[in-house]
Image (cartoon, helix red, strand yellow):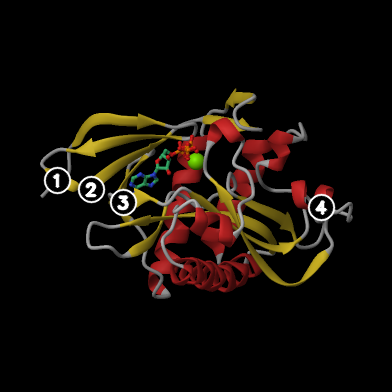
Amino acid sequence: MENKKGSLLYEGKAKKVFAVENDDSLVWLEFKDSLTAYNAQKKAEMEEKGTINLKIATFIFEYLKSNAVESHWLKTFGERDMVCKKVEIIPLEVVVRNTLAGSTAKKFAIEEGTPLKAPLVEFYYKKDELNDPFISDDQILALNICKEQQTLDQLKKEALRVNVLLKDLFAKAKIDLIDFKLEFGRTPEGDIILSDEISPDSCRLWDVNSQEKMDKDRFRRDLGGVIEAYKEVLRRLLEV
Ligand SMILES: Nc1ncnc2c1ncn2[C@@H]1O[C@H](COP(=O)(O)OP(=O)(O)OP(=O)(O)O)[C@@H](O)[C@H]1O
Ligand SMILES: [Mg+2]
């Protein structure tokens, strides 16, 4: 049966979340053209951003699915829309880093681009009012954000598995995967699955040869050519 867009449930910075008519187990995500950074202190509208990110996210969810990584993604429609399993988002940003960049390079006063000895998984507490602060495993458990260390271990393991697959995919597209952010959610059955989106908004992607940035840092740092870079990421992925 054809899915129909229901009422607006939530408007985020990058996507609108709609109900799906007659099916409570699904959500309809509409990708917007907005770009925000530094917790929305910096904002812009960029034509085609939503469409390009939808295509990239779709490509990545399909690729992960073909490699046995379950996610919320079910299908993509037209230029802006995807239908996904509705989940209860775990309020953690699960960040994987292969190379130091951004705030973490700054924090340790180590040059951006320094490789890490092994991929690093970090949790940040998803709370806009607090600017998504770093949160330790013990803090997550003490605050009862997750009930068991086992859940955190599962999130880390799944994030590292996604990292191996994405590093390989991007390498074929002549792109270095520097770092990225994942969100996970719980299905009504209690399974934890990869959710939200994976796109140049949520990854750091550097050209293998020039080390030129091909991600949202172009916007954060006013480097220009944001849409051109996102389009190039998509073009290379489709060539893989
Ligand atoms: N399958 C899903 N079911 C329910 N909610 C989802 C699902 N996938 C993503 N979301 C949520 O949809 C919201 C909209 O996405 P968007 O990226 O625009 O949010 P955002 O502005 O980054 O805000 P937030 O701080 O809430 O993540 C996010 O809160 C995200 O966690
Ligand atoms: Mg988001």
Q: Are marks 4 and 2 in contact (CB under 8 Å)?
A: no
Q: Quickly name the residue at label 4.
A: 105
Marks 4 and 1, the one that precedes in the sequence: 1
Give the mark, 4 or 2, whose residue is nearer the N terminus: 2
The kind of secondary structure element at disc 4 is: helix
Percent x, y for residue 75?
29, 53
The secondary structure type at the circle numbered 3 is loop
Q: Residue at x 27, y 63 (%)?
A: 190
Q: CA distance from mark 4 to mark 1?
A: 45 Å
The residue at which mark 2 appears reads as: 26
In the foreground, 54 or 132: 132
Mark sitting earlier along the chain (3/1): 1
Query: Is any part of residue 235 visible from this angle?
Result: no
Q: Which residue is mark 1?
A: 23
The residue that disc 3 covers is: 87
Q: CA distance from mark 2 to mark 1?
A: 6 Å
Give, as a three-letter code, the residue at label 1: Asp
In front: label 4 or label 1: 4
SS class of the residue under badge 2? Answer: strand
Give above or below for 163 relative to 57: below
Residues at circles 4 and 3 in contact by the CB criterion of under 8 Å: no
Q: Is residue 12 left or right of residue 218?
A: left
Mark 4–mark 3 distance (CA, rounded to whole Å) = 33 Å
Query: Which is closer to the viewer, label 2 or label 3?
Result: 3
Q: Give the x, y percent position of residue 224.
A: 74, 33
Residue 152 horizontal/vertical position (percent): 49, 66
- In the image: residue 19, left or right of residue 101: left
Query: Residue flagged by tag 3: what amino acid is it?
Result: Val
Quadrant observed for ligand 1 in the rendered image: top left
Identify the amino acid type marked 2.
Leu
